[in-house]
Amino acid sequence: MSQLIRKNLDTPEEDRPFEGGTGHLQVVNLDAGAVGRATFEPGWRWSAHVRPIAGTDSCRAAHLGYFISGRMTVQMEDGEQMDYGPGDFAVMAPGHDAWVVGDEPCVFVDWQGFADYAKRR
């Protein structure tokens, strides 16, 4: 087995679109798990654009990631809410909704929660 591996999110193994043309998720798969880069367009909201794909009331993925650009608000089922933007690292437990804030696409790289995110079954 090679000791060096290279994958590139510009040539992903999977590209999963969100409902309504509101963005997409690019995924590469590693032995340690999937890594993904999501681009969420202005107007994107998990409950409107991923819920129909996931079939759950809230996002059930745990996320560990980094915001490259844009802004996003995440709200937990208990009402706790946080805003994220460029340069922010984020840890998000399952059970949340999220939406893009402003008129700039939000780009987020996740090392934990994108293996099955927005994956049609």
Image (cartoon, helix red, strand yellow):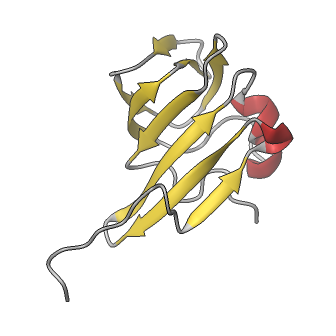
- Indicate whether 83 appears above or below 26: above
Residue displayed at 40% across by 60% down:
8
Q: Most extreme residue toward the left, as rendered?
A: 3
- Indicate whether 33 appears above or below 51: below
Horizontal arrangement in the rendering, residue 69 relative to residue 32 (left or right): right
Q: Quadrant of the C terminus?
A: bottom right
Q: Most extreme residue toward the bottom, as rendered?
A: 1
Q: Quadrant of the N terminus?
A: bottom left
Which x, y percent locates residue 76? Answer: 57, 22
Residue displayed at 45% across by 55% down:
9
Horizontal arrangement in the rendering, residue 28 relative to residue 25 (left or right): left
**Snapshot quadrant of residue 45:** top right
Residue displayed at 80% across by 40% down:
21
**Snapshot quadrant of residue 101:** top right
Residue displayed at 55% across by 54% down:
26
Which x, y percent locates residue 35? Answer: 42, 55
Horizontal arrangement in the rendering, residue 5 relative to residue 13 (left or right): left
Which x, y percent locates residue 56? Answer: 74, 44
- Indicate whether 18 appears above or below 82: below
Pick the front one: 26 or 113:
26
Instruction: Please tell me how many numbered marks the rendered image carries.
Output: 0
Pick the front one: 81 or 83:
83
